[in-house]
Image: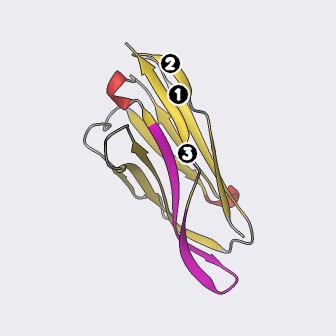
Amino acid sequence: QVQLVESGGGLVQAGGSLRLSCVASGSIFSINAMGWYRQAPGNQRELVASITSGGSTNYAGSVKGRFTISRDNAKNTVYLQMNSLKPEDTAVYYCKADGVYTRGLIRDYWGQGTQVTVSS
């Protein structure tokens, strides 16, 4: 059984920073890509940033230059450093692991989400 556990969310003032972490645990042989998504009330879930096992990154236009995604493959962990936070960044942030190879199966997994609230 694979589990993704996020941490690092919280309440911060506009202009502040937060660092999210997501650890994938279980009998994992490899993970293709890992990423962060967010969903604000009344909105669809959207991609924030993703990173492949080789380190290639992709960012939503709204966070480019402010957020940085990184990954520790040995620890099956992905991070999201969020700087210059804005009230519109307020959302539940979800970690996703794509192409998780475990016990002969390959599938995607989601974390349970962590709340990020940015006050103005």
Q: Amino acid at mark 1?
A: Leu
**What separation in Å lies between label 1 and label 2 (alpha carbons)?**
8 Å
**Image height check: is 119 above or below 82?**
above
Residue ID for mark 1:
18
Comparing marks 1 and 3, which lies closer to the viewer?
A: 3
Q: Is residue 102 magenta?
A: yes
Q: Which mark is residue 93?
A: none
- Please name the residue shown 40% across and 36% down the image: 67
Q: Is there CB contact under 8 Å for labels 1 and 2? A: yes
Give SS at disc 3. Answer: loop
- Please name the residue shown 40% across and 16% down the image: 15
Q: Amino acid at mark 2?
A: Val
Q: Which mark is residue 12?
A: 2
Comparing marks 1 and 2, which lies closer to the viewer?
A: 2
Q: Residues within 10 Å of mark 1 (few under 14, many from 20)?
A: some
Q: Residues within 10 Å of mark 3 (few under 14, many from 20)?
A: many
Where is residue 12 shown, x and y percent of the image? 50, 18
The quadrant of the rendering that contains the C terminus is: top left
Prevailing SS of the magenta stretch: strand
Single out the residue that lies furthest toward the bottom.
Answer: 104
Q: Amino acid at mark 3?
A: Gly
Q: Residues within 10 Å of mark 2 (few under 14, many from 20)?
A: some
- Please name the residue shown 69% across and 56% down the image: 75
Tell me where the magenta segment starts and ends, as one range: 92-109
Residue ID for mark 3:
113
Comparing marks 3 and 2, which lies closer to the viewer?
A: 3
Q: Would residue 19 appear left or right of 119 to someone viewing this image?
A: right
Give SS at disc 1. Answer: strand
Where is residue 81 shown, x and y percent of the image? 50, 35
Give SS at disc 2. Answer: strand
